[in-house]
Amino acid sequence: MTIEQRPADLPPEKAAHRTTTLTRRDKGHYTATNARGGTIPVSGGDNDDFTPVELLLAGIAGCTAIDVDHLTARRSEPAGFEVQVEAEKVSDEHGNHLQDIVVTFRVTYPEGDGGDAARAILPDIVKKSHDRLCTVSRTVMLGADVSTVIQ
């Protein structure tokens, strides 16, 4: 981990740049805000707000779901679409982290040619999302440096 002092005049947003800001509401309770103004309450798990770990799992689920849905829905709208992500939180010589992350798709399509076509490509699209498309799970799998800046 790197801790730096850096001036507030950071470079302007670029097309590939992503940002989320977390603002304290109360002790242990925050609001995450994206660049478009969307918000999500975040806390440490003492209420029904998402915890940071749950947001990470939701990020994996959401990212791969978007990939799969966009590509399969061209053939048929799903009759049911659910993605569940589970993991084990451990504390060991590497500190706190998740392991054994499992992404489970539960997707059904209606009978007919469109549903048959969507079912046929589903395994390939899920694999492509896992292997190269989903930015969130790819970042987790590949690892990324995280720097900390104090302003």
Image (cartoon, helix red, strand yellow):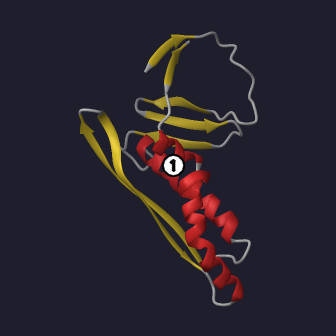
Could you tell me if residue 59 is visible in this image? yes
Image quadrant occupied by the N terminus: top left
Q: Does 110 appear above or below 101? A: below
Q: Position of residue 114 (x, y in %)?
A: 71, 83
Q: Would residue 45 appear left or right of 7 to someone viewing this image?
A: left
Q: Which residue does the numbered mark 1 point to in the structure image?
A: 137
Image quadrant occupied by the C terminus: top right
Residue drawn at 43 percent across, 39 percent down: 43
Could you tell me if residue 62 is visible in this image? no
Question: SS for tag 1?
Answer: helix
Q: Residues within 10 Å of mark 1 (few under 14, many from 20)?
A: many
Mark 1 residue type: Ser
Residue 118 placement: quadrant = bottom right
Q: Does 135 appear above or below 33? A: below
Residue drawn at 59 percent across, 52 percent down: 132
Residue 91 placement: quadrant = top left
Residue drawn at 69 percent across, 71 percent down: 73
Q: Position of residue 23 (x, y in %)?
A: 54, 29
